[in-house]
Structure formats: C-alpha cells, structure tokens
Image (tube, coloured by chain):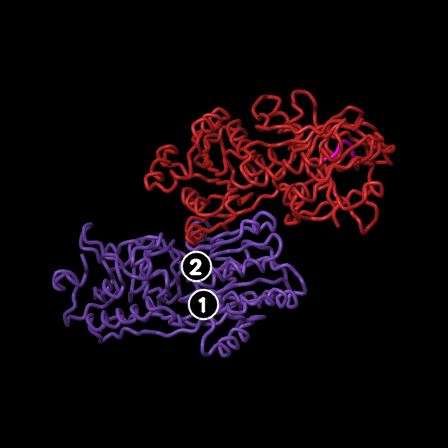
Chain colours: A red, B purple
Amino acid sequence: MRLQNITPSNTFSTSSVPSGNRAIVYNSNGDPARVLSAVSFPELSSPPPDTLNIRLLLAPINPADINVIEGIYPAKPHPDVSLSQSKDLLVFVGGNEGLGEVMEIGDGVAGLQKGDWVVLTKAQTGTWSSAKNVASSDVLKVPRQGLSEVQAATITVNPPTAYNMLHDFAQLAEGDWMIQNGANSAVGQAVIQIAAAKGYKTINFIRDREDVESLKSHLELLGATHVVTYDELFDKSFRAKVKTWTGGKDIRLGLNCVSGKTTTLMARLLGDSAHLVSYGAMSKEPLSLPTSLFIFKNLTCHGFWQTRWYSEKSLEERQELFDTLTALMRDGKLRDPGHEILTIGRMESDDSASERIRELVAQLGRGMYGKKVLLRIEETA
Amino acid sequence: MRLQNITPSNTFSTSSVPSGNRAIVYNSNGDPARVLSAVSFPELSSPPPDTLNIRLLLAPINPADINVIEGIYPAKPHPDVSLSQSKDLLVFVGGNEGLGEVMEIGDGVAGLQKGDWVVLTKAQTGTWSSAKNVASSDVLKVPRQGLSEVQAATITVNPPTAYNMLHDFAQLAEGDWMIQNGANSAVGQAVIQIAAAKGYKTINFIRDREDVESLKSHLELLGATHVVTYDELFDKSFRAKVKTWTGGKDIRLGLNCVSGKTTTLMARLLGDSAHLVSYGAMSKEPLSLPTSLFIFKNLTCHGFWQTRWYSEKSLEERQELFDTLTALMRDGKLRDPGHEILTIGRMESDDSASERIRELVAQLGRGMYGKKVLLRIEETA
C-alpha cells in the first residue's frame, strides 16, 4: 500500500493548518521516484526519559538510501512509530545520515544540552525530516566549532569509511603507497585527503570524461599523488610507470568501489601480501581475480561496511573516530564534499515538496549526478 | 640447451661403468616430457661440516613440480652444484618433496644419526634422486615409528596445507561446518580426515564421474560428512538442503582449489564473516565473486601456499606441525594418499629410465591421473 493512496485526512495533515514538521516518507518499497512523499506532522511532544528531540538541519541522500527504499539493501529501515497508523500501515522516514541540533532533553540524558550538534549512529532511523525524537544512546555529539553544517551532516558514512579502510587492513606508514578506484566519489575524495594528511602516497583511478583534466586538478589539489583514467590501466606500459612512481616499493592497499575488469587490472598492481578492500561495485560486475594473486602474492580481499563497523564497536571507539575526523576537518585537512542543497521551505505544500523530491531522486537514479545532494527540511509555518 | 642434446660422455656417465647414483634432471624449462632425463652420477663424497648425505627413499611427483619444470611456478629451483658443469650449464634435479634416510653425517650436525628419516623443508632443492648432500638446517627428522614410507614422503606439502588452512583462518570448534571443492585431491582427502579428527563437519564437492558412488563412499569412509557433485550446486533447492544439514549454522570456512563458476556458487553457501581460502585453480578460471559478499556478508578471501608458510615460520613451529601430523598418522587418523610407485631399478639404463619418466609425466599432464605418483630411484649397480 502506498502512502499517496491514503486519504490525507486519515493520516497526516496536508491541509492549511500549520502542523510544525515535515518528513519524506514511504510505506512500501519501490522506485523512490514513485513511493516517496512529503508529509506534515505536528510538533513533537516532550521527550520521554533517556531520549531527546532534535531538529534535523541537513541530511544527505546517499546512494544506499535509494537502495533501502527500493528494498534491495541488506540493512532494513526502522518504521517511524509516531507516523505509523498501525502495525499494518508502517511508515518509514527516508535517510540514514544527518545533522541534528538538540532542542529538548528527556530525563536521565547526560552530556548533552540544548543547541548541541549530534549525529545519528544507529543505522536506518530516518533523517529526512525536520525533527525527530531519538534515544540518547543513538546519537553522538559533534563539536560545532570549526565544522560546517555540511561536514557535520556527512560525517557518519563517507569519512569514517575512508578512514577505517585506510587503517583497519594494511599497516601503512608515512611514504607508503595505496591505490583506489572511483577516486572522485565522496569516499574516494575523503581517502585522498586522509591519506595525504597521513603522508601516504595515492594512485587514483577515475573514469575518462570531457572535463577530465579539471577533475584531475581538483583531486590533486586535495592531495592525490597521481590521478589516472581506467584507459591507462589497459596500456601495457602502465605497470612500468607505476614502478617508476613507487620506486619499486610494494603497494600494500587497494580500495575498490567499482569491481569488474578494471579492478582485476588494478589488483595486479598490488605488491606482495597486499589487502584489497571493497566497499562498492559501481560497475555492477563481480570482483574477478586470478587465483594466483591469492596463492603466490598472498593477496587478501576484504569488504568494508561502515554500518557493520558501528554495530561492532563501542561508544568509546566511535567517539574516538569522530574526534579524529573532526580534528582533520578543523585543521582544513578534510573538506566539504562537493554538494548541493535542496531546501524544502516552510511555506511549501506537501504536494509540491513531494513532486520536487521525486524529481530529484529520479535524476539521481539516472547515475553520475557528480555531487552529494543534501536535504534541508524546514519546520512548517 | 637441453640435457639430452649433450653428448653423454662429456657430462654424466651413461655407460656400463657403475656410478652409484641416479637423478631425474633438466637444464632448461619446458614440457617435462621433453626436457627431463635420467642421469647417473658417482657416489657422494663425505659430507662437509653441518651437512649430511641422505639416500632418498621415495619422492612424489606433485602438480607443482611439473609447473616448476615448465618454468611457470613462482618458486624457482636451486641448481645442483655437483651435477652442474659450469655456471652456463646449470643442472636442476626435479622434485620438491621426499623422504630421505641419513647415510653419513658431517661435523657439527646434532640430533641426527645414521638411519634416521628426514624430509626436506627447504623448497625446490631437488628430490628425484637416489642420494643427496643437504644442509642439516634444511631437513626435519620424521619419526619412523608408525609411519609408512609413503606417508613420510608426502608429509611436507599436502597434509600441512590441509592442516594450516583448517586452522589459520577461521576459528572452528567441534561441530562447526566447513566446505571444500576438489575434495578428492590429496589435500582435499587430508582436509576430510583432519577435520573429522577435530570434529568439524564437512561438505565436499567432487566432479561427477562414472564411478562417483564409489568415490563418495571412499571419502565418507575417510570421514566426510557430505559428498556432493558440482551439478547439485546449480540446483536451486541445494541451498535449502545445506541449511537442513547445518541446522542453519553459518559455514565459516571454505577451501578452494578449483575457482570458476562452481566456486562462485560455493562461496554463496558461506555464512556471515566467513573465510574462503584458495590453494589452487584447477578450472584455470579466475575466482569471481559478487562484491556484496565482501561488503554485506563480510567475506574474506585468502590464498594459502605452504612454501610461504615454511619461509615465515621458525624451526620450532615447523617441528610442532610435523609432530601433530605424525601423531595423526600414527593414530590412523590420516592415512596414505591413494598412490602408485614408479621404481627406477638399479640395473636399468639411463635411457630406459628417461623414457619411462617422460611417458609418466606426459600421462600426468593429460590430467586426472587420480593417484599420487611417487618415484623410487634406486642406487645404481
């Protein structure tokens, strides 16, 4: 059953009565350009003990969010209890990541006060909303000082993915080399910057495109040691070129968000006892490797999923990671991802908001949007 | 330059003069059925300090030995100094594994005496010979008691490969499940037996064949929990069948010596956070896996190469492994591999021996010999 088929008066107010809040929701999996709707809902009541009410300032639309709505992502969303009418009509708020500002604090919540910035560390709770009640154990405080809203709103998925992949598998030291594909993705750009901050040398693959030189310059400005297109991988002389760059030093870490043929070629550039860590498969092809790389070069292939990392780590470990990342941001070593903000205004009707969000996700679905898009859903008038 | 093109009188005695020893050698890489020759050579002189002279009782022909001769194996052989005429005419003795009996001990060698059984732990020193001088640091003593010559002669490659793959990657406990392909290979059969001794349950894949039921029975007798053909993997109901067997328990370890399509399907049977360890690629196809297995199921893919293991481990660790394996053999838990022995007799001419060895390797090269073949090269009359 789709939300847009429900008579509005039975569910949420879409009338002229100002109701305080708005969220982008769905109640059945499918094409986001069909199943998403903007709905208004009343002001939040006072937070129960151990919870807090937050106003969501900005929430990104990550590729995985689309897959969650489509129902093809392994992490399943939690229904929004207050928006759901019954167990048979569950409503899900879209979005997994976002920046909140603490508005009101329930009894028993320590270490947080009104006006603090927080991010959600519990996956799939729904962040495409103007406000939300959350358990205090599901948020982490983020220092406001020195951070932009965009940096804070995108701090829980891409930068930690980049940071952990650089640190959890190969033990790299300053001057060591690593290699990655999809280097212009949000994670790829974070990898370039964190690696540069640590003194690691990077070889970065991107797709050829009309403005490839300007993209190369951009990534080099972020700290990339070398930026190359996949076409160069097919050139037989490329291996020798890499050897010249590295001085014959083994490349011990490869990061992959593409898979398919070019990743097979990239893996051949790795040195002895290297680690290849996959976090995506944009080619939609499998990861295919000669068995000899495993046996004789002692290659190890891993996957990385930040959601799993959070579920396995203690609050202290999560806090430590955030402190490291926010320090990098404050020091100007980890910048805003290239982005665009879609604001759903306080005076806008739900119908108009629904239409705009569907248009946007349809565009995103056609691939290569090139920029991270964030939603700013204002409180309604 | 090929050994068979050298005038025998210029190099080794192939005449009627009894010369004491014989080896299967080559001096250029290529098809073993072309480049291998039997050559006679004199009795060994007394061993220099820290070395010993051993009589080789039995030496297997392993698949990797063929690849070494072909020149396509990453581990390169050491030339035999005493047989090589000059730096420009290096002679290599075939074989990597074998059982020796100590004949004579050089000064400074401790812990070994005449009549002791030893195996070579230095890779690619050449074992297809009737006798050999070796450094005492390159051998390990093997207890004669309770071991057959065949067990001792094949103890350094296949059983340790099986043992280490079962223990170095996933932490299995009694009652846990593992899965493997190529289950009727020498390693596969050792895996079945060691797993059974440890109380691990095994699912074993083999190729369909005429006498498949008798092979299944044989592997079940060795301790296999289930033996299935690859054809069953393609059946959609197979996954459910495996779930019934395991009671839904995650399979945490897969061993692969095949790669290609069937290994992709086998990998899908693995549970969360499993390890897939490759030690061969009999299909000659790559290992191709959906990237989602890495990301969302936390699969880790490794390779295993016993040669690397030896190079990285201390003498104490190697000795410990041998003690474990010989104990399993003495207890009847790890039996002789199915085998056949080719004896090069003391009265046979080098020409006849050369011919027989070339015929044998040609047969082995046509694949699926089904049995391990060992060489017994007698001293010459």
Numbered tag placed on residue B280 in the rendering: 2
Task: Measure how far apart labels 2 and 1 are at the Cα level.
Answer: 11 Å
The amino acid type of the residue labelled 1 equals Ser
Q: Is there CB contact under 8 Å for labels 2 and 1?
A: yes
Asked which secondary structure carries label 1, the reply is loop
At x 58% / y 21%, what residue is drawn? A332
> Which stretch appears magenta?
A128-132
Q: Looking at the picture, how far across and down is residue A184, in whole percent?
A: 51, 33
Magenta-colored stretch includes residue A149 = no
Mark 1 sits on what residue? B185
Is A134 on the left or on the right of A107, as rendered?
A: left
Q: Chain of mark 2?
A: B
At x 62% / y 68%, what residue is drawn? B241
Q: Earlier in the sequence, mark 2 or mark 1?
A: 1
Quarter in which the C terminus of chain A is drawn: top right
Q: Looking at the picture, how far across and down is residue A211, in whole percent?
A: 45, 29
